[in-house]
């Protein structure tokens, strides 16, 4: 039920069902509302529990500061040498809204889920000197409402230990439940921000794209969005046995081996202690995702691809795409030789062992070897997933399914070295390329790509 509200007047004051928030004018126009809670802080007994609506608050809550990232062990694999730090807070279930204005209705709503392997990242991720997912440029240019959400990560979001089962017998997939709860918040509240709750696109990049795939498959997300878009995300999911085994291994590693008292033991530990056994989510261009969604019979009744083929998923239009050089950021120049690529290919069974060198010739130089390695890993981890998902969808689906392939590169030496790397499209979609260190290099072609992506994504939401 909605909370009793005494709503003052003001250009950036909005009444949500939990209380009144006051945002601020965005630079360049429109309004922004940052750090708006969509659920109670998942602390104490709510650590590893389904999200609950936030408590009502009195007065006007400021919404002008980004919330902290969700607690994580963050790795910067682009640093030399790579760096690691623990950051964020468990009190992180918030969202951000950018709108051209709160008056009027009918604006399409674009809800974004950030990436990071479901283990790191936030709605405030920064790269090349810019806030990569800042929604104000896209909102102002396309006359849409943009929402970005945060969700529990890693072991906080995807631990599947039986000791954590709730009264209905469910455990795990908390990060997905957070996303579903946020989409419910959008359905109930976005009209007050000038958005149309019947024109909601949910989209995500990398692990955020993987999560969108899960949402298309999940019966708990039915009716919460009207279109879905997957950017460089697969549909990888663990079986129940795999998820339970990983959770058992981790719980033992942090000092809670006794199954009988495990829930209390885990909830008593400090968040930083819980992160201690976590390793990097990527190694030499190969993703290593320890805590991700699993088939739990509730959030995910079956593997999503199986649900798609059977037609038991949420029937909405879908776009799915990948980039030409997905893993180039993770494979520095000179880091691989033709012999190493050949040895890598030999790890695969036949017929792949014979086919891979033909499809991706290792060449005779480090430059040629790197190209082959990047193309092989990008196809294997991303493009083949896009083909698998889209083909499964059309088996049990009458709504449109479209694919894209992103080949545009940033101007200057970075584009020459990295090509169309993983995540590059976000700078163009959100138009945050205009705020990056390379802003002075942007030309007409770059702005054409920005207009194209913003237009396509918006039209998917609205039509």
Image: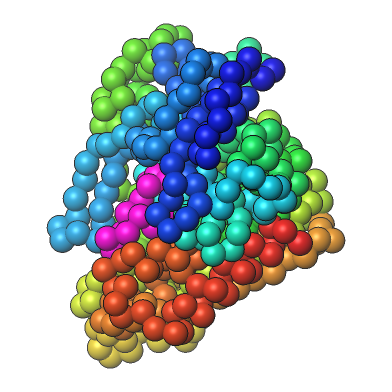
Looking at this view, name the residue that lies furthest to the bottom: 364
Q: In the figure, 337 relative to 302: above or below?
A: below
Residue 337 occupies quadrant: bottom left
Question: Residue at horizontal 51%, vertical 80%?
Answer: 448
Looking at this view, name the residue that lies furthest to the right: 398
Work out which quarter of the rendered image holds the C terminus and state it: bottom right
Question: Residue at horizontal 26%, vertical 68%?
Answer: 437
Left/right placement of residue 100 relative to residue 392 reads left
Q: In the figure, 272 relative to 331: above or below?
A: above
Looking at this view, name the residue that lies furthest to the left: 81
Numbered circles on residues, count = 0
Residue 139 in the image, given as x and y percentages of width and height:
54, 57
Colour scheme of the picture: rainbow
Work out which quarter of the rendered image holds the N terminus and state it: top right
Question: Residue at horizontal 31%, vertical 34%?
Answer: 88
**Residue 271 at least partly seen:** yes
Q: Which residues are magenta?
A: 121-134
Left/right placement of residue 330 relative to residue 201 reads left
Magenta residue check for 130: yes
Residue 303 in the image, given as x and y percentages of width and height:
66, 46
Q: In the figure, 367 relative to 231: above or below?
A: below
* Majority SS type along the magenta span: loop
71 or 393, which lies in front? 71
Residue 276 occupies quadrant: top left
Magenta residue check for 6: no
Q: In the figure, 151 relative to 133: above or below?
A: above
Left/right placement of residue 57 relative to residue 213 reads left
Residue 107 in the image, given as x and y percentages of width and height:
67, 53
58 or 444, which lies in front? 58
364 or 79, which lies in front? 79
Residue 82 in the image, given as x and y percentages of width and height:
19, 55
């Amino acid at each position: 039920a909605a909370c009793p509200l005494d709503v003052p007047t003001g250009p950036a004051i909005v009444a949500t069902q939990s209380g009144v928030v006051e945002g601020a004018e965005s630079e360049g126009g429109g309004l922004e509302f940052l750090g708006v809670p969509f659920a109670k802080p998942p602390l104490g007994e709510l650590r590893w529990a389904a999200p609950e609506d936030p408590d009502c608050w009195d007065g006007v809550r400021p919404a002008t500061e980004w919330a902290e990232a969700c607690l994580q062990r963050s790795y910067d694999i682009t640093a030399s040498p790579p760096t690691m730090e623990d950051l964020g807070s468990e009190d992180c279930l918030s969202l951000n809204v950018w709108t051209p204005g709160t008056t009027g209705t009918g604006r399409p709503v674009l809800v974004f889920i950030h990436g990071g392997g479901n283990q790191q990242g936030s709605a405030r991720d920064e790269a090349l000197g810019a806030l990569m997912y800042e929604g104000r440029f896209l909102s102002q240019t396309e006359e849409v409402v943009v929402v970005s959400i945060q969700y529990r990560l890693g072991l906080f979001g995807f631990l599947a230990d039986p000791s954590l089962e709730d009264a209905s017998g469910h455990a795990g997939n908390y990060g997905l439940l957070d996303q579903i709860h946020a989409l419910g918040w959008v359905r109930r509240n976005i009209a007050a921000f000038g958005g149309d709750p019947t024109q909601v696109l949910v989209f995500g990049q990398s692990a955020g794209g993987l999560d969108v795939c899960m949402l298309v498959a999940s019966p708990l997300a039915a009716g919460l969005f009207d279109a879905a878009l997957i950017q460089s995300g697969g549909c990888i999911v663990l079986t129940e046995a795999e998820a339970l085994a990983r959770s058992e291994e981790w719980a033992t590693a942090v000092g809670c081996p006794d199954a009988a008292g495990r829930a209390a033991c885990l909830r008593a530990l400090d968040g930083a202690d819980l992160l201690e056994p976590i390793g990097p989510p990527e190694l030499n261009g190969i993703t290593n995702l320890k805590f991700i969604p699993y088939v739990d019979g509730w959030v995910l009744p079956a593997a999503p691809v199986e649900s798609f083929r059977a037609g038991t998923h949420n029937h909405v239009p879908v776009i799915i795409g990948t980039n030409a050089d997905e893993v180039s950021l993770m494979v520095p120049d000179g880091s691989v030789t033709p012999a190493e690529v050949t040895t890598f290919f030999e790890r695969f069974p036949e017929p792949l062992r014979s086919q891979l060198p033909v499809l991706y010739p290792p060449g005779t130089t480090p430059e040629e070897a790197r190209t082959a390695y990047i193309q092989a890993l990008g196809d294997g981890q991303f493009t083949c997933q896009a083909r698998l998902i889209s083909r499964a969808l059309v088996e049990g689906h009458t709504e449109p399914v479209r694919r894209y392939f992103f080949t545009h590169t940033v101007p200057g030496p970075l584009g020459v070295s990295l090509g169309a790397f993983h995540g590059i499209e976000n700078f163009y979609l959100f138009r945050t390329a205009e705020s990056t260190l390379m802003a002075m290099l942007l030309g007409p072609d770059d702005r054409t790509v920005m207009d194209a992506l913003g237009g396509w994504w918006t039209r998917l939401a609205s039509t």
